[in-house]
Image (spheres, helix red, strand yellow):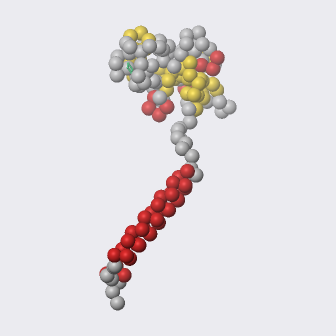
Amino acid sequence: MEPWWQQPVSRRQFILRVGWGLVYGSLLSWAMATLRYMFPNVLYEPSAVFKAGLPGEYEVGTVTTKWVREQRTWIIRNSQGIYALWARCTHLGCTPNWFDTERRFKCPCHGSNFNIDGDVIAGPAPKPLFRAAVSLAEDGQLQIDKAQLENRPGKREGGTFFLPYKSA
Ligand code: FES
């Protein structure tokens, strides 16, 4: 006996098979849509909080660039303490670079320049770079929170956006 796919098919059988195929196809797509509905449309983003080592690891007067690639953040220590700048240009969002010899950040996209405080000193950027909240975690490490940002002079130098620190 021939296998079923080689047996002759009448017009009536053909139409019936196509019809059932359409019914099963639409049931399957309805079931898949229902299944997809069970899962929320959530965007899983990395945490905005990260630990950046011990404050004593940062030298006074330096801009540390080691977190830029991973966390898009510079950590800066001055004679009074530590702050973290979010490495996102306030013009259109490119990542500026730090030029130590010129003591400024330069944005490669349209030429904005920022000083070590994050203030605009050249270019189209409309406002200063943002600082991220910085605190000490229980284990003594710096904890940076990029979900809390501030760039207004007078506000950014205090509160959670500047960590007073002097090494012993
Ligand atoms: S994105 Fe930085 S100057 Fe335009």
Closer-to-camera residue (120/127): 127
> Would you say residue 125 is visible in this rendering?
yes
> Would you say residue 54 is visible in this rendering?
no
**Residue 39 vertical placement versus 2 (above, below):** above
- Residue at 42% across / 19% down in the picture? 91
Closer-to-camera residue (23/104): 23
Query: How many labels sit on residues?
Result: 0
Look at the image and tell me in which quarter the N terminus lies: bottom left
Q: Residue 78, position in %: x, y?
A: 54, 15
Q: Residue 139, position in %: x, y?
A: 66, 33
Look at the image and tell me in which quarter the C terminus lies: top right
Q: Residue 96, position in %: x, y?
A: 40, 22
- Residue at 38% across / 71% down in the picture? 15
- Residue at 51% across / 19% down in the picture? 130
- Residue at 53% across / 16% down in the picture? 151
**Residue 25 vertical placement versus 159 (above, below):** below
Judge left or right: residue 89 versus residue 160. left
Q: Quadrant of ligand 1?
A: top left
Closer-to-camera residue (167/77): 77
Q: Residue furthest bottom?
A: 1
Q: Residue furthest front?
A: 12
Judge left or right: residue 56 versus residue 102. right
Closer-to-camera residue (12/161): 12
Q: Residue 28, position in %: x, y?
A: 48, 62
